[in-house]
């Protein structure tokens, strides 16, 4: 029937309109999960038993500056519309910074985090432009490079610029309470991770991405446990809870391309690499540079981010520009971070470090008897 | 082609049917988030280190009574259908009560919360009728007036009626553990807040509402931090974690109307007003009335609720009926609360206050060694 | 008009296509909530104050083995497609095992959980086949039988096979911290429960299922509180936080069939039965068998699971095959569990039980001063 086929385009358009609105509505919750993860990253970093509230406060201050600034810059300078993609983009910017401050938490005074939030945004937008406008064919739907690598190397740039070595001498004891919060954060981050890596993917890639992400993450659990057990006969919970997330970090660049089996193997490799970084690379870097990555960001986000960034090349989906993106993000991240670190030296250093007493009336409020 | 246009209404109807079902499915998760927030409100109130389980128990008891009673009343008396809007409406009723009990937690014995749940529902339904049936043109999609203001003033009515001044003399010490739970609750409430204020909005208003809500909340973080730092040089975590939510409280009435910039300013004002209420108004009210708002509900929900309720007038979207809704909710809330407070005087007062030992075998279960 | 009606099937197909994709996207979040609940079950079991990290680790190890193995078996042997239903099915398998290990947590050494994960999957798949392929007309959309009953009786089979009575003599003291985490887990499990029981239902059953589930759960709160108060005059938080979830366990088999009022009554009965099991049956079983169900799994999942499994018969929706499913799952679960328990006897027993020191450098990391 001729009429029917002549109607088909109209029908298609209409059902696609429905689909577009549905897809956008559906992105609301994936986007919200990214904000959820941003908060959980704070709890992942609360293992120092005298330094919990300070971590939460720093997280909120950089969130409160970077999130609206990213939106303002995109709307004001580039004329972007305030839609769900921009909200998610701004949340990505903010969570990248929350990960990055993990490198230098305790190194600067609380009020300086407001400055950090302002100085971070232009750098992040530069990397976005570098990866997706300057370069061509870079694959990074889930942020292995843009979020994790940039966070780690920008943060390392900051401590290299700051060179506040006094913080190395601060005690960083843990407690059951503080470490159990880390377990909570790690386990819930694992659950929400598929929302993060598929947040900006089209609807048809979301379910395969969900399968790939969970497969990568359970493989990281396995690799981390087996390596720690084989080498140490005891499980350091601060290595375990971090390294099991490496699968999520590494799957980011190929979440929409890898097969389920490939995803599981990516998770296995990432978990192993992250565990080994915590066990060996961490101390080597501290010895070489004299500065201390407070939360081990390099071991979870830096190295597994590189692994993830290179996966699309290994799997044959990407070429030279992908390698340029990985190397470029590392170098640009470090340089931009050093600049920010040097600027932060202009601000007074905290007299109390890695302790809530720096910002809070902590002595009065910390009961010695926990009942 | 004539036939095509004659078919269009049919097509429209069909795609709209799809849209309606999609919208309803989509409301499932926004509704679920409201229940999530209801539980988080309990953890926001757990800062007294000997009074954690009692807060959770009271929350569950008022939830268990008010939620089904609201549904029963609407189905039984008004013939409402059990659809997602009714479930969300009942969750709104229950969360309003959970906020309200924050005013008098510790003032009454545990079993009396069952009575509180039963007595609250008719009053809440009266305010719903007053705002949306008796009055015309009242704007309050996100509950600035219906949820936050009513919770605060109804709760204040209850303590004024109860006049259990003995609770003022109880110690209310905190611990790292108890305050860190408050940080968790506050930070996750912030994440879920867009679901709350857009729960009953049509699909096309959800994404703009999401942007407005997060912008209002990050502005509150900024205002709260800067005012506390300027006035006190130290951040009281129990003021900070509460006041940063004021942007969410105040955006409620105009979440679907304000521009993003207006939303950010609303959050700035609400955060400032809430912080100042905690710092100055709280003590003044305690001195004047002789009773104590255990959780500072008035400072987070009362005053920012009034601010939020008046915003649609300031922005030119609403007129006199909006002002009548604000004033009426304050007065009716107080009067209904006093009546409930007087009824609650008929029940035996708790011998142990602000302590889990009132309801639980706490002495046996609270290990003195936290390991 | 003849042409219009001739077009209708096409239109229907197209709008249904939209619906199918929407439904699948929508299942993403219900599925994710099941993973969230899996993690929360770990926190529900963290009440022993020296045994928190060990519970989290065991949970992650059985998740990391059972989840990919279930997917692999279904894809490799039965040619299943990797879609959202398979992901959710695998999550159901994994959460069933996480519930089940609650029976014998602390009875086996940590590394043995990897073996447990491998041995569990074939048994779970056998029960799936038994209930939905061998039998006909079994109703269990929300897993009262497949998840809860099977978890409880398989787990009990394991401890009966293991017979590690030494664990009975270990101290299992609680702390404010450990019990407050249980409150958090229980209250959030309640919130997410509708996602679990409706995860595999068609879209039109999701909202009614949401209403039914919340109604069943609030009824359990009421029944649990009133019975504990009437019989004990004090609320044991470890009975209360568990038994209030019994309504969710019992509604599983009839969530898509029961009326709201029936659901509330199911919750009332389940809460009462679970509370009484904790108060009386638990000790009786320990006396009779000499072994100890560490987390009281039988009282929350076993008995309320039986109640829930039988509900469709009482309501007239199911017949004899439903009874066969209930009895068969109990018997097959016990037998399969005993076999796994006997195999686990081949592995070295843990020298330290119910203590994080079994797997972690706990003595160094547990600060005695919690500050």
Image (cartoon, coloured by chain):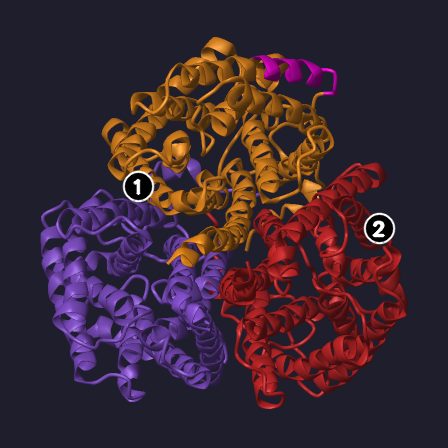
Chain colours: A purple, B orange, C red
Decide if residue C34 is on the left or right side of residue A103: right
> Quick check: marks 2 and 1 in contact, CB under 8 Å?
no
Q: Toward the viewer: C7 or B85?
A: C7
Mark 2 = which residue? C276
Give the magenta range. B335-348
Q: Residue at x 13, y 57 (%)?
A: A341
Mark 1: which secondary structure? helix
Type of secondary structure dominating the magenta stretch: helix
Q: Residues within 10 Å of mark 2 (few under 14, many from 20)?
A: some
Mark 1 = which residue? B215
How far is mark 2 from mark 1, CA to CA? 49 Å
Q: Toward the viewer: A181 or B16?
A: B16
Q: Residue at x 49, y 37 (%)?
A: B174
Q: Residue at x 23, y 29 (%)?
A: B230
**Residue B344 part of the magenta-drawn span:** yes
Q: Quadrant of residue A153?
A: bottom left
Residue A151: horizontal and vertical position, in percent?
25, 64
Q: Is residue C371 above or below residue B124?
A: below
Residue C349: horizontal and vertical position, in percent?
68, 80
């Amino acid at each position: 029937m001729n009429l029917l086929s002549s109607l088909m385009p109209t029908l298609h358009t209409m059902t696609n309109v429905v689909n577009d609105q549905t897809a956008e509505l559906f992105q609301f919750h994936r986007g919200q999960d990214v904000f959820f993860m941003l908060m959980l990253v704070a709890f992942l970093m609360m293992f120092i038993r005298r330094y919990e509230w300070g971590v939460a406060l720093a997280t909120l201050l950089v969130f409160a500056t970077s999130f609206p600034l990213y939106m303002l810059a995109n709307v004001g300078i580039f004329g972007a519309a305030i839609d769900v993609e921009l909200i998610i983009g701004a949340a990505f910017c903010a969570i990248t910074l929350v990960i990055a401050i993990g490198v230098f938490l305790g190194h600067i005074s609380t009020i300086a985090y407001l400055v950090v939030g302002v100085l971070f945004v232009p750098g992040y937008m530069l990397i976005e432009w570098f990866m997706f406008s300057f370069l061509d064919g870079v694959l990074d739907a889930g942020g292995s490079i843009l979020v994790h690598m940039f966070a780690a190397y920008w943060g390392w740039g900051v401590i290299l610029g700051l060179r506040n070595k006094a913080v190395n001498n601060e005690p960083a004891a843990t407690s059951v309470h503080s470490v159990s919060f880390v377990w909570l954060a790690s386990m819930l981050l694992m659950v929400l991770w598929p929302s993060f890596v598929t947040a900006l993917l089209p609807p048809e890639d979301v379910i395969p991405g969900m399968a790939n992400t969970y497969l990568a993450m359970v493989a990281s659990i396995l690799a981390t446990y087996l390596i720690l057990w084989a080498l140490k006969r005891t499980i350091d919970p601060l290595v375990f809870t971090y390294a099991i997330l490496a699968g999520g970090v590494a799957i980011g660049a190929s979440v929409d391309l890898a097969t389920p089996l490939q995803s599981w193997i990516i998770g296995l490799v990432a978990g192993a690499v992250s565990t080994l970084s915590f066990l060996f690379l961490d101390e080597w870097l501290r010895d070489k540079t004299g500065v201390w990555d407070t939360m081990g960001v390099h071991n979870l986000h830096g190295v597994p981010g590189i692994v993830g960034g290179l996966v699309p090349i290994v799997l044959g989906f990407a070429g030279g520009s992908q390698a340029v993106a990985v190397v470029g993000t590392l170098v640009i991240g470090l340089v931009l971070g050093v600049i920010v670190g040097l600027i932060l030296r202009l601000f007074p250093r905290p007299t109390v470090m890695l302790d809530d007493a720096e910002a809070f009336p902590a002595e009065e409020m910390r009961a010695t008897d926990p009942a």
